[in-house]
């Protein structure tokens, strides 16, 4: 019984069209290309802008940390900033924890 069921599917398997290898992978390739242009490339651009902003920070610049704390840079070290967040309150922050530079609008 099992042999007759298997043998009935054998001609179907043999008559399957032989597609090209590239044609089968084309949708996957297009999917990855779309992901690159929609997700990865913009993220890399934002990361480069953030890295440039970090290297341009200097003493006296007002910043906001990635945690939402505002402060003023009082000292720049190799891998961190010393930031004044209140009167008589200074903290050392990793350069990676800086979220953005705060720009003050002129009235």
Image: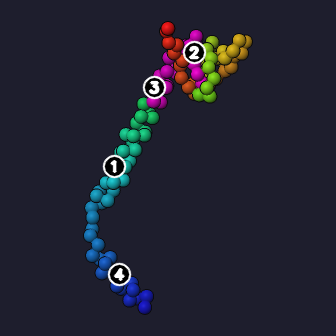
Image location (x, y in percent) of residue 49: 45, 25
N-term mark: 4 or 1: 4
Residue under circle 1?
A: 30
Residue 107 falls left or right of residue 65: left
Q: Is residue 105 magenta?
A: no
Front position among marks 2 and 4 = 2
Residue under circle 4?
A: 9
N-term mark: 2 or 4: 4
Residue under circle 3?
A: 49
Q: Are marks 2 and 4 in contact (CB under 8 Å)?
A: no
Image location (x, y in percent) of residue 106: 49, 9
Span shown in magenta: 46-65
Residue 29 falls left or right of residue 93: left
Q: Is residue 47 magenta?
A: yes
Front position among marks 1 and 2 = 2
Q: Are marks 3 and 1 in contact (CB under 8 Å)?
A: no
Q: Which mark is residue 62?
A: 2
Q: Residue at x 26, y 70 (%)?
A: 17
Q: Given the current orientation, which residue lies at the most extreme top position?
A: 107
User: Disc 1 on helix, strand or loop?
Assistant: helix
Q: Which mark is residue 20?
A: none
Assess disc 1: are there few (<14), some (14-19) or many (≥20) residues with their C-alpha within 10 Å of its C-alpha. few
Front position among marks 2 and 3 = 2
N-term mark: 1 or 2: 1
| Quadrant housing residue 82 | top right
The N terminus sits in image quarter:
bottom left
Could you give the CA–CA distance between mark 2 and mark 3, rounded to whole angstroms? 17 Å
Could you give the CA–CA distance between mark 2 and mark 4, rounded to whole angstroms? 73 Å
User: Disc 4 on helix, strand or loop?
Assistant: helix
Could you give the CA–CA distance between mark 4 and mark 1, rounded to whole angstroms? 33 Å
Q: Residue at x 40, y 36 (%)?
A: 41
């Amino acid at each position: 019984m099992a042999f007759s069921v298997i043998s009935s599917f054998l001609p179907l398997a043999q008559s399957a069209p032989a597609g090209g290898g590239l044609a089968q992978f084309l949708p996957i390739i297009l999917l990855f290309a779309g992901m690159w242009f929609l997700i990865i490339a913009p993220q890399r651009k934002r990361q480069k802008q953030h890295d440039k902003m970090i290297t341009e920070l200097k003493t006296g610049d007002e910043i906001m940390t990635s945690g939402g704390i505002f402060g003023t840079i009082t000292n720049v070290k190799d891998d961190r900033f010393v930031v004044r967040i209140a009167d008589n309150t200074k903290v050392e922050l990793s350069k990676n924890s800086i979220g953005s530079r705060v720009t003050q609008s002129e009235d």
